[in-house]
Amino acid sequence: MISDYNQFRSFFASQDVPEKAFDVSRDEETTNLHAVSMESITALSQWTENSYDRKNRKLQIIPGYIESMTPNAVADSDGSNFYIGINNALFVIIHEFSMFCFAQQNFFPNIGDANNEVSPEPLDGRAPGLWLLNHTTKGERVSDLHSKHLIPRCSERYVASIYLAQIMLRYVWLHELAHCCNGHIGYIRDHKIASRVHELETGLSAAQLSNNKVIQNLEQMQLLEYDADSVAFAGSVRIQNNGLENVEGIRNLGKDQAVDLTIFGAFAMAWLFEEIQAYLNVRKNVSHPAPYLRLHNLVRTANKYLESELADIRDRSQSAYEKFDSIKGVIPKIYSGQKIAADLESNDFQLQFLKIDQEMTALRDKLQIYRFDPKPIET
């Protein structure tokens, strides 16, 4: 993975619907956190520089930010390079949500002085982040009242909220990276399913949704999202468990705290995308699975693939989704830890995911020729 702003900018400016790249620098206070996130994922993804597909094509990935008020993320390719991008609006929403969580007394109460927090309710009843997006889209200014409802009062908790946001952004980066490395982009293009992968639903008409071929393609797109989620989640947890964290502040939290924040952050992204879909009034569960099912896929990924590496991952996952309950008092529509636990044991859910597992196994066989894997280093 390489950072090449000019190439990133040129690619997105040349699309049928041009998009404007957002330049970031560590030296600029307003973009420092953008830069830290992108530098971190670039360094963590150095293994991609020696990765090739079955046709011996080298994997080249260029990350960047897109200046857009639509909260989204994307994976795309020009045939030679892959591009993964995060829209500025999604960056802001993640940070707003993270700060709001740490302003709640019962959220990770072992970090800092949680008793100093006042557990505010969201402004205008909107989910944190979406309120700010709606406010600024209408050209309105942000007042001091907004800050009081957002920023944790305890300085240690405020800093922790920034680290949680960085962890959540990393999960998004890894998700888009998986679309490239696992052969998703090559597959959907070769089979004329789509040309790129966005995190928000694509707009399709009722007539298109009644077409059997379209339905089959959308089912495959949903499977690819499950796959990218699982890879991003497992990768995020392994970064912490294997001592690979490269953001000093997150590393200084200690492995246990960092793992717990990582698991919660991934679970929280599922709920955030549900809220974003509702805010934008886009058609749900078309090219992407229902966010609640994506959350269940993450829990199952933890139990199925990570227990051998982290013996208490089941308990940590349960503790993570129960953290939603510490926010539910002020955001009643957020997921319920009790319901998640009950649904995990539900026969209907288990049968549904058994079918998904079987379909995913078959699809992975088809993806093999599009995958990029590291070449053994010759000695």
Image (cartoon, rainbow, N blue to C red):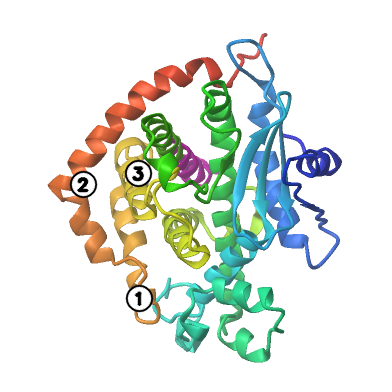
One can see residue 45 in this view: no
Q: Position of residue 167 (x, y in %)?
A: 56, 55
* Magenta segment boundaries in residue numbering: 227-244
Spatial CA distance of label 1 from label 2 is: 23 Å
**As drawn, 133 above or below 344:** below
Give residue 176's mark: none
* Image quadrant occupied by the C terminus: top right
Query: In the image, 142: left or right of 251?
Result: right
* Image quadrant occupied by the N terminus: top right
| Nearest to viewer (mark 1 / mark 2) | 2
At mark 1, the secondary structure is helix
Query: In the image, 265: left or right of 166?
Result: left
Instruction: Identify the residue at image location x=48%, y=17%.
Output: 368
- Point out the tag, 1 or 2, that comes first from the N-terminus: 1
Q: Position of residue 101 (x, y in %)?
A: 48, 73
| Nearest to viewer (mark 3 / mark 2) | 2
> Which one is in front, 373 or 363?
363
At mark 3, the secondary structure is helix
Give residue 349's mark: 2
- Point out the tag, 3 or 2, that comes first from the N-terminus: 3
Q: Which residue is mark 3?
A: 302
Q: Which residue is mark 1?
A: 328
At mark 2, the secondary structure is helix
Spatial CA distance of label 1 from label 3 is: 24 Å
